[in-house]
Each structure stands twice: as structure tokens, then as C-alpha cells.
Amino acid sequence: MRPERGPSGPLSSLSKGVLRASFFAPALGLLLFLVIIPVAETIFISFFSPNGSFVGLQNYRDVVTSTDTIDLRDSRIPFGTAIHNLLWVLIHLPLSLSSGMFLAVILQRVRGSSIVKSMIFLGMVTPLIVGGVFLRFLFDEKAGIVPAVFRFLGVTALARQWTAFPDTLLFGVILGSVWLWTGFSLIVYSAGLTTIPKDYFDAAKIDGASSWQTFRRVTWPLLRPMTLVVVTMTVLWELKIFDIVVTAAGTQGGVGGAADVLGLQMFRYFVNQQYNKAAVVATLLTITTILLGLWTLRKMVPGLGTGRKGGSLRSRVARRVASLFAGIGAPIRSRLRSIRWPEIRRPRMPFRLRLPRRARTVLVHVVAWSIGLLWLVPFLGVLMASIRPFSEIVYGWWQPSPFTASADHFEQVWNHPTYPLSSGFRNSFIVAIPSTLIPMFVASVAAYGFARFRFPMRDYLFLSIVVLMAVPQQMVAVPIFLQMNSLGLLDNHLSLILVHSAWGLPWILLFMRNFFLTLPVEVEEAARVDGASDFKIFYRIVLPMALPALAAVTVLQFMWVWNDYFFALILISPFSDQQLATQLVPKLGIGQYNVDWGLLSAASLLVLLVPVLVYSLLQRFYIRGMVGWTIKG
Amino acid sequence: MGQAAPRAGRTLITALLVLVIAVLVTASAVYYGFPQKVQVPVQQLPACADGQPRDANFNCPAPVPLKVIGPWSAAEKDAFLPVLDLFRRETGISYAYATQRQEDLQQSLPLDFSAHRTPADVIFMPSSFVKQYGTQGHAVNLQGTIVEANYAPGALDPVKVGTSIYGGVYTGKVKPGFWYRHSFFAAHDLRPPTTWVEFTDLLAAIKPYVRNQAIISGDGVGWPLSDVTEHFIATYGGPSMHRQLTAGTLAWTSPSVKSIFTNYLVPTLEAGDWSAPREWTAGVTEWWNGDYGLYFMGSWITGMVPDPSDLGVFSLPGAPGPVGIVFGPDYFFVPTYSSKLAEAKQLAAFLAGTKAQTMQVRQGGHLATVTGVPITAYPVVDAGVARLLEGKEILSDLDDTIGGTFQTVFWSKLQLLWADPTQLDTVLADIEAAAP
């Protein structure tokens, strides 16, 4: 099915090879200099002592046997970073994935779904540098909504300061992160849903399939490439999880280390200049990511990897890896075509809700909008803190009296005499726009190559790039800083643009490649028969069809760059007028001995509004992309 | 309509590609520099200050100010700037001040130092950081710049290695004990305790009059809890125990140390006298509103309440011997890579002098570390706090002095102790494992 051997044009095989190599060159170049070489340095130093002598696996032994990593001495929580990360995967992944997919599916049929999606996406765009403000309005004994709800329900055991006790801290942070991360799976699945031809749903409907059957037999299988993206990215995020934990629990992981995670353990090594041990954690994270990612994906996508049997171990592994990451859209489509709807047996369900169509529509709308409003709750706290004096909301932002509202805090942060947020916004735009567009196009070109061209070691190369997503930023901080210093690019936006472009490539590549796999190859084959070159096919045919995915990439990459704090911290100095908005937020509200909740909340809201607006504006491209899809054939 | 979407898509993509190219061209221009039309020899003109190059019109740029990084923002910064203004008036050296959180600097400064750079000429950081990087050659030895005799004996020890002084001690905050409202105590006929039994009786007496526990446990990332613990140690273990623990010559698991916990702190935790750790800035409001009766906090609380004259404070009573009191100064240092070393040293000497510290304490909330600052310079409430130091041995903040991994472990394990006092043995064992 793949367009491997279309009618050859005037190009010789050599020039064709060169042309195809050019699909990969920009991405590989950026990755090589700004990710791969720094990462290689990281792995290298993990075998050395701080004074530079080779110590073999000693650093690994020290880290693995540390009670920070595994702590089973006492059953009352602290399990250690490795166990905590495992808990993250086991709890957070299914919750965020299923809730994102559920919302994406039901929001297809909801009026004003774009607004509801924007509400849910708010969690994703929260800059974690100010996440503490949000957590306060979630988990604080007096000002937090969660203990207040449990107090109302009479569950006094949970009507307490959630961050002060090991059990509630760990699970509170994980659940809070579901709130944050669901926006990601929602946006990916929403993009994926636009690629499913409406004909399939119509056919299923005509054949009498129920909503559940349609979801199980049509939507779910066709969303598997997107599931692959969500699972991979979520597992990677969970293994690297850092910001939210440090925000909620501090650098030691909170009460006795109850919420400590590997990313935080590595961060502590980094801050304490134990770079070798930090490198060990980063390397272990990468290896764990590969193993866990493969295992998870195999479980998630049964039936894959059932290709040829036998051969050497190496070839079997290679086939396994290739099958896990290879195209799965075509087999699913062919399987779909083979379905005879009347033969489908209705799933045995404990009960069946039989409601008139109108009542069902109302129910779906009520559920969708309720969830959307629920997602807004933490923001209401921040909004109240930004417009009301702190003394009015200290016992809960929902207290109606007294209510003194003003926009003073917003005005103060925007025109602050020392750290005007307006200039931070300008700088953030200067960095975020090119840092979104450059990797999007560079990665899309390469992703198309990975999706359509066949060449030796392709899957290994792809896997190697994807694995780079597992590397935490802190681990390459030193080499990147030195690189930029030698180039004279410190305090220069170009350094941030280059770094973000390179660091955005792996995930965009994975995302776009999997999206391209969901596109039909027939149109490309026809174009190839007509003599179109690979690049012309990509540019004229494939990219226009990829608008939904490009819009999703734009939103996510823009948001990540916009919210970045770490790279900005090390590459832009505190005196520079090039500082980004996220750099200015803590300076506006957090002092050594005082926190100005009003300024902090106002600055936080302003900063997160930009990605929300970008998301809202780009939603229409989903629709347009869907229109483009339906005219394909 | 069918053709509209691909066409729109192509148009969008073309526009975006053009934008990408424009960005790349601009970026390369920024990196490599825009071509200059005329190269004019300027050697015959006098050099600019700081050796800066002249601009295209042969003018010298404005002199680069002395850069200072401190942790103070908003009102705290406003209280510090008059000091820098005074320095500028006296020396004619202009300055620029930037706020930067110390936890952020802990990440970025090592990178700057590895590239032999510094973001500022004078930087405020914890003493453990100053000492660590000073010994590695990243901080200027200020011996001869800072007059040790101006301080109380031992004040510079946290930033001193041998005879080298890698930093200066600015003003500080004392952590004297439990704060209360005079009006609250008067309304309920309560009195500051003079013995341990009176203290526990006071806690019991407070409970009926507050909405929550008798004492609020302020929490940031664990540090107010560490202040409380240090206060118990410095009172019932004495200054020598505090110093030995700081130096790592006494084990946290030793019976003498453990007895401070089992005899004093843990019983009050188990009795429910303390709240669960709460965000400490909001805690000030809650305590002031009468949700709690007592608040252990540093002297900076005087600048955080609506009516400082209603504030009272007492230390833990009934000490068996000499009593120590923890004093937490702010430390600064001059990075080796400063391009304005002479001016930076001038500022260092100024900050370690009477004039600067007198100006700072006048703003409220700070206590001087150098001798010679008149008591009249303090606001009334701060003068009262300053008097609390009389007759007590001054101790450096234990976890600030040790720093590094110990500090965060210490904080985290104390949070665990507050959550579950029965885990005392595990807590002390883990703290000991991280101790120097």
C-alpha cells in the first residue's frame, strides 16, 4: 500500500535519495547539535566521578540503592521516587487518557464545544511557575475547594490541608495533574477525530450500530495512532514529571518525600552540582522510558507486532519495535471495511439507558458543560484573588461578602515600573512564534519521510528520536549554556528559539508521523503517477490535509514555549530587557518574606490567557481540516 | 467549497513558510550582525568609561551601572532601594537592582560561573552557597574590604574559610519565639509563660478562644518548621547543642537531641496544639483574625500585620541553662567575574557598614548585624525585638548554614514529623543521614 515505487520521474535514484534525505536533514541537524550531543555528554558523565575519574557503574549503584529512589522502610507512604513514578503511570495515565477521549467524543455533539474545550485546555496552559497559586485554591484547608467539598459532604478525614499529609499529598498531586493534562489528550483526540471520515459513522448508523458500538468499532480503532501519541507522551511526561511536584511539594517532594519523583531527585542532584548522579537519573529515565513505553504500547495496541516469526533475536526485536511504531492506520481501515454491522453483537451491559434522542442530547450537553465548568473552578480562585483583596478570600474565594472588585492588580503588573509585564509579553511573542513555526515545519517534513519512505534503520532512527523526549531539560542545561555562551547568544532570543525548536522536534515528529499515517495514500499515489515529486506531494497534497494536526501542534508547542521557565532562566539574565513574561511573574509577586497574592494572581491570569486565545482561535482550523478531508475523494 | 480548504491551507502554509524564512534571516542578521556601511577608525578618540565601544555616532554609551541582585520584591524591595540610593549619593556610582529568587539563582549561577560569567556584581545568597562557591574561586575574598571588627565575634563564620572572607553579612531577622496579640491575651486574661508547664497550660487555655489549634504552623517549603525546631533545640539543648548539630559533631539520633523532641516538641504535636502546616503568609492573616492564638515566626512579621503595636512575643520558657536565639542575616558576595570589581567592593564595604544598615533598619523589619547602629534608628516594635537579643547567645540559622541536600531533607522530614509524630525515629535517622 505504501508509495514506495511510484512511476519514476526524471530523477535518478541517486538524486531521489538526496531529495528524500533533505526531508530529514534540517531536523537531524538541529537535533544533533542541540539535543543529541548534549545528551551524549550527559550519558558519558554518568560513568565518571565529579573529579573526572572513571567509576564504571558506581554512580548507578549509589543512586539505585539510595532511600530516595526506593524507600520501603515504613508503610506510611514514602515509597521512593521510582515507586512514585510508577504510581503516576498507573493512576494518571488511564485517568487522563480516558477523560480526554471521553470529552473529545462527547464534545463532537455539543453546541459551544469550542468554549468547553477552551475551559478544559486552561489546565494545560497554566504556567507551573505559578502553579502554587492554583494548588492553594484547590487543596488549602481553608481557601481550597477540595477540602471545602469534603467538609460539606461530612468527610472530615479529607477536609484538611491536603499538602500537609503524605497520602493526600501524593494522590492530590496526581489528581491535580489529571486536571492539568486532560487538555492534552483532549486536543490530540479532537484532532484525530477530524480525520475519521463521516461516511464511517453514517454507515454504522444506517446499519443500526449503537453509540457504544460505533465508538468501540469505529472511533477507538481509528484513534489508535492518536492513542499511541497520547500514551507515549503521557508516559514520558509522567516519568519526567517535575514542575507540578516542585510547585506543590518543594524540592524534597513534600512531607517526608511523599511526593518525590525521579525528575525531582535529578533536579536536586543538579542544583547540588552532583551532575554525575543527575546524569545517572536521566539515563535511567531514558532506559525506563524505552522499556515502559514499549510495554505500554504493546498492551495498548494488541495485535500489533504479529508479523513474520523467527529470525535472530535482533531481527525479532527490530520487527517488534518497528511494528509498534509502524503504520497502523491501513490495517485498521482494512479491518473496518471487513466489518459487517448486522453481525455485531450488542455488548453485554449491566443496563441500557434508553432515552429519547432529545433527552440524550440535553444530557450530553449538561454533562459536557458541567465538566467544563468544573475545570474552571481552580481558576475562579485565582480570578478572585486577582480582583479582590486577599483578606476577602482567605477563607474561600466563594465567600460572597465583602466583595470589593477592582482591576488595579492587572494595571499594576502590566505597567509595573521595574518589571512591566507588557515588555515580557512582547519578548515572549518574539520567542514563541518562531519557536513554534520552525519546529513545526522542520518536524513535519521529517515526519512525512518517516511515514512514507522506507530505508534501512528507519524505525531505529525514529525510535531514537522519540526517545529523546525522555531527556529532562536540566540534564542538558550545562552543555547548552556553554554552547550558547561560545556562540555569544546568551541574553539573545535567538538562543531560546534554537533550543526550543530543537527540543520541540521529537514530539512534533512523533505526532505528525502518526497523523500522516492516518491519511489515505491513494491521493499521493495518484499524484506520483502524474509525475509529482515527493516534495510537491508533501507540500501540495499532504500538508493541506494535515491542517488539523498542524493546528494542534501549534497550540501545544506555542503553549510549551510560552510557559517555559527553565531555559529562559539559564539563557536570559535577570537584568536583560529580553526577559520573558514567565520570568517576570514571580518577580512581581513573590518576595523573600512576603507574597503579593493579588499581583501574582493577576500576572498569572494574563500570562495564561495568551495560549488560551491561541487555542480558541485555532480551533476553527480543525473544522476546516475536516472539510478538506471530506472532499478528498 | 470543496476546493476552498486546500487553497486556504496552501495560502496559510505559504505565508507561514515565508514567515519562517523571514525569522531565520532576521535571526542570522542578529547573530552575525548587520553589515556596516563605513568603518571609521576611532582610535584617536578618548576611550569610553568601562572600555565600552563607541556607537555609530562616536558617542560613548551611558556607563554600565553596578548590578545588584537581591531576593526582595515589592514592598521589601522598596525598603532596600533607599540604601542603594544612599550609596549612589555617597559614591556617585549608579546601580541597577533586580529581583531574583534564590532557588532560581541556585540553578543558574553555577552555569554562569562555569562560563566565567556573572549576572551581577553583588549578589545576595545564603551563606552555604557563598562559602561553597567562594572556596571554588567564584567569589572574591573580601578580607580587607569588610571590617570584621564591626561585627560581633563569629558573625562572619558562615562565609569564612580560614582567613578568607567570601561574603558580607547584611541586616537580618531574628526568630525570637511565639507571637501573640496583646489585645487577644488581654481579652482572655492570658499571660506569657515563664515555665514549660505554664507554656502547656497556656496552650490549653488558648484553645477555647480560637477557632482552630492553639498554635499555627506556618509553612513555606518547610522552613518555618525548621525555625520552630531550632528554637526548641537552642532553648532546651542550649547554644552548644545547636552549634554541635550545625558543625556535624553531634548526631541527631543521639539521646540528648532526641530527648528535646520526646520531652518537649513531640508531646505538643501529639496533643494537637499545632495546626497542620499552612502557607505561612496566609497564616498571618488567619492568626491575626483569631483562628489561632500563637504564631512562631521571625521578626519580619512586624511588617506583615495591620497594627504592629498590638504585637507581643515570648521565647520558650524554662530553659535549664544558657539560651541561644537564632538570627538569620542576609548574606551577599562579589562574584570573581564582575567587570566592576572595585565598585562592587565599595558597595560590599558599604553594605557591611553602619550607614547602610542604619538606613535599612529605619525602613522596619530588619535588625542590624554591625555594631554602632543606634537603637533610635529602629521603629518601636523592632526596637523591642532587638532588646530580645540581650542576654542570649546569637546562633546562625542551622539549615541555612549547612545548606545543600541537608536543608531540604531537614525541611521535608520535619513536615513528616508534623504529619505523624510517631515517626520520630525515622525522621531523626533520615536527618542524621543527610547531616554533614
Image: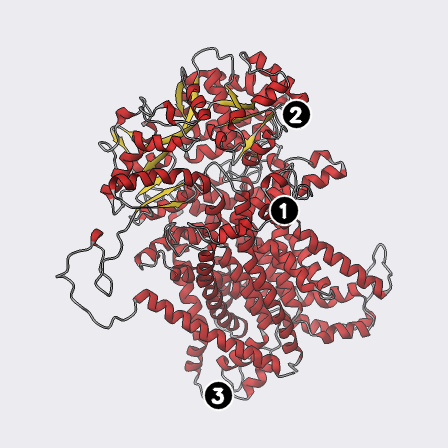
* Helix, strand or loop status at disc 1: helix
Label 3: how many Cα within 10 Å (few below 14, some 14–19, many 20+): some
Residue B385: % across, % down: 45, 23
Q: Residue at x 54, y 25 (%)?
A: B310
Circle 3: residue type = Gly
Q: Is residue A501 above or below residue A597?
A: below
Pointer 3 indicates a residue of which chain?
Answer: A
A314, A287: nearer the viewer: A287
| Residues under numbered marks 3 and 1 in contact, where contact means CB atoms less than 8 Å apart | no
Mark 3, mark 1: which one is toward the viewer? 1
Q: Would you say residue B249 is visible in this rendering?
A: no
Looking at the image, is mark 3 or mark 2 nearer the viewer?
Answer: 2
Q: Position of residue A440 (x, y in %)?
A: 50, 68
**Same chain shared by disc 3 and disc 1:** yes
Q: Which tag, 3 or 1, sits closer to the chain's start?
A: 3
Above or below B192: residue A321: below
Label of residue A9 in the image = 3
- Same chain for labels 2 and 1? Say yes or no: no
Of A103 and A307, nearer the camera is A103
Query: Residue A591 location in percent, x, y?
Result: 46, 40
Judge from the rendering whether residue A131 lies leftward or rightward of residue A593; answer left or right.
right
Can you tell which mark lies on residue A381? 1
Q: Which residue is mark 2?
A: B210
Q: Chain of mark 1?
A: A
